[in-house]
Amino acid sequence: MASDLGLRLYQNRIVVKVGTSTLTNGIGQNDLRSFNSLACVLSDVHNMGYEIILVSSGAIAVGANKLKMETRPETLRLKQAAAAVGQCSIMFLYDRFFNDYGKTIAQILLNAEDMEIEEKKDNLTNTFDTLLEMNIIPVVNENDSVSYTEIESIDKLFGDNDMLSAVVAVSCRAHKLIILSDIDGFYENDPRLYPDAKRIERITSIDDVQSLAGGAGSRRGTGGMKTKLQAAKLATSHGIDTIVTNGKNPSALYEIVKGEPVGTLFVGENAS
């Protein structure tokens, strides 16, 4: 918990995670309107005095699109090749759209060990702090082009970067973690299968809803509600409020920073 660590959270620091399903459209092509809308809203929130860290998935899907692959690659070598190509495309698009709104971005690619080895973790935290002090928006992704454990693992540590975003939020002592998903929040049942499913607006105990989480996410992404619950559990245990909401409506961030109810709020424990 935050109080146990003896560290206070940065009240103006927000980690925003965007998934593959938000950055691509229904047929797997790059959703340029989503890239633009996300850059616009994050730049505007940045102008309001908030520090923004963007954790972005999508390298493999975007790379597969650029390489004109008809389906998502299955073998490790093709996944890593697609990730290497896709990461260039994603950063080009982010740089283009954020630049339109007068913002400078930086790229940070991580492996699991970067967050597990204390010396690397400290150096990484210092890099984040320095970039944020310089009014730069870091764009973070898992380093799929060289990391094979995450791509091949059935039970992924990062799960389409859901857990990565929580680890980054904890390391950077962010006040909020916002996970932009392909649904409006956490539901009692899968709303794609049960149209009358009810969204839960506020959750204070993740253990109470753990059994409601399903499996994997969309066919283009790899994260499902299970990994989002895992991410929320890690973040909230350190006092970080975590919100899951729909990535196709990034303007919801305006309401979130004002403290208005959006999506599903997982309440941080003993937030400071």
Image (cartoon, helix red, strand yellow):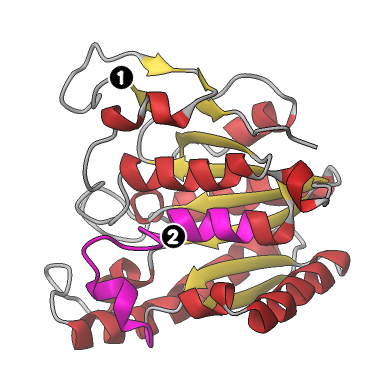
- Sequence-wise, which precedes: disc 2 or disc 1? 2
In-front residue for pair 90/108: 108
Q: CA distance from mark 2 to mark 1?
A: 23 Å
Residue at 83% across, 50% down: 6
In-front residue for pair 112/220: 112
- List x then y, in percent, for residue 236: 60, 39
Q: Amino acid at mark 1?
A: Glu
Q: Which residues are magenta?
A: 145-169
Corner quadrant of residue 116: bottom right
Assess disc 1: are there few (<14), some (14-19) or many (≥20) residues with their C-alpha within 10 Å of its C-alpha.
some
Secondary structure beneath disc 2? loop
Disc 2 designates what residue?
161
**Above or below, 189 relative to 217:** above
Quarter of the picture containing the C terminus is top right
In-front residue for pair 27/147: 147
Q: Amino acid at mark 2?
A: Asn
- Side (left or right) of 18 relative to 48: left
Q: Is residue 111 visible?
A: no
Residue at 76% across, 52% down: 5
Residue at 75% across, 63% down: 103
